[in-house]
Image: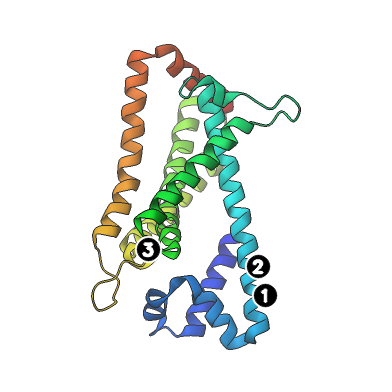
Amino acid sequence: MIGVFYAFAAWAVVVGVGEGAIIEEAAADPTTLITRVTEQYLGPVGSIAVAVLFLGSMFAAVLSLHNVLTRYHHAMANARVLPDRVGTVHAQHGSPHVASIVQVATSGIAIIVLALIGFAPENIFSWFAGIGTLAIVILMAVTCLSVVVYFARTRVLRSPWHTVIAPILGFVGLAVSAVLIAANFPLLVSDVDAEGNPAWGPISITLVGVVVIAPVIGLVQAAIMRAKAPEAYAQIVRRFDENA
């Protein structure tokens, strides 16, 4: 249902702007595209309402991401990948407050550094949104394949629909989406040439490089940990097995 709503919303924006002008309008100022279309058809009140809803949804998304990263920090500390202090919980509330503070501090430092360098807020937003969008689609596609591999090895469930057909259909859809996102990545991150047309430049190449290099760094780190800290590595694997 969420995917259908996203598709409908994207279709409405394209129709509102015009198929022939959507790329130019999005490249000109992607941060205000939705509000401009809304104001054109619903007036100032509609534009303000959509802006408030958009800010609320962005807050919810950022809060969700914060919680996910906090849990990762907490789990990695318990697995001895990060300092033990990061894995402690609050004495009264039982929340991973140290991991939460570390996550906020890390994000804050990154934003401050980028701002001091001179990057505009809308550029920072579009760049990180582009990385996150492409990375999460690829991650979900790989997860679909892992479902097939897991049930093929364990045989704990024998339903063809749940173990093969549905995951493969999901993988195909997500793989196609990832290819389309990658093909239009300059438009997604507002990387344009001298004439204002979306084009592959240093920004797009660097951001896609982050998506490619990050898992490689993780695999190298895992290999080093397996060789130098086999107990910590075994504990991580054991946690994965327990969660599966």
Q: Label 2's element?
A: helix
Q: Are marks 1 and 3 in contact (CB under 8 Å)?
A: no
Can you identify the residue that label 3 sits on?
189
Q: Earlier in the sequence, mark 2 or mark 3?
A: 2
Horizontal and vertical percent position of residue 237: 47, 21
Up the image or down, 97 lies above or below 178; here it is above
Residue at the (42%, 83%) spot, across then down: 19
Question: What's the distance in space between the residues labelled 2 and 1, CA to CA?
Answer: 6 Å
The disc placed on residue 53 is 2
Amino acid type assigned to the residue bearing label 3 in the image: Val
28 sits left or right of 159 in the view: left
Amino acid type assigned to the residue bearing label 2 in the image: Leu
Residue at the (34%, 27%) spot, across then down: 221
Q: Label 3's element?
A: loop
How many callouts does the rendering have?
3
Can you identify the residue that label 1 sits on?
49
Question: What's the distance in space between the residues labelled 1 and 3, CA to CA?
Answer: 26 Å
Amino acid type assigned to the residue bearing label 1 in the image: Ala
Q: Which quadrant would the C terminus be assigned to in this image?
A: top right
Q: Are marks 2 and 1 in contact (CB under 8 Å)?
A: yes
Residue at the (45%, 16%) spot, across then down: 232
